[in-house]
Image (tube, rainbow, N blue to C red):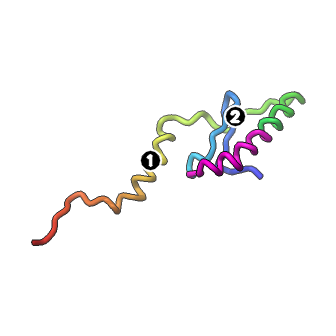
Amino acid sequence: YHFQGLRLLKGNKVLLAPKYGLPPFVVDQIYRPYLADLSAALHRLEDAGWHVRPQSPPPGWLTCLKPLAGLFRRNLWRVRLHRTLPL
């Protein structure tokens, strides 16, 4: 399998699920072993003469803010700017 949110970056790094919140235990139990296997496969390709190109540029600061913007948008309905109550 290959997770659609995973992108290869320069410098033997990956971008993992920028649009999805993954619990730490899922990352540790599922994706770390998968990344170890993916790394071994990429090294075998490079040893065979293939050049593996990055799939995406490294995330910028705006990409890092998007999850926070989504969190704010999803919880905006909970915010009351003025708390007025009738007497």
Q: Residue at x 13, y 71 (%)?
A: 86
Q: Quadrant of the C terminus?
A: bottom left
Residue 44 colored magenta? no
* Residue kind at label 1, given as amino acid type: Leu
Q: Residue at x 83, y 38 (%)?
A: 41
Read off the residue under disc 2: 54
In the image, 60 versus 80, the foreground residue is: 80
Read off the residue under disc 1: 68
Residue 22 colored magenta? yes
Q: Position of residue 10 (x, y in %)?
A: 67, 30
* Residue kind at label 2, given as amino acid type: Pro
- Side of 1 where 75 appears, left or right: left
- Side of 42 where 8 appears, left or right: left
| Mark 2 crowd level (few <14, some 14–19, many ≥20, 10 Å Cα) | some
How many marks overall?
2
Q: Residue at x 86, y 33 (%)?
A: 44
Q: Residue at x 47, y 39 (%)?
A: 62
Which residues, given as a range, are shown in magenta? 21-38
Q: Position of residue 61 (x, y in %)?
A: 48, 35
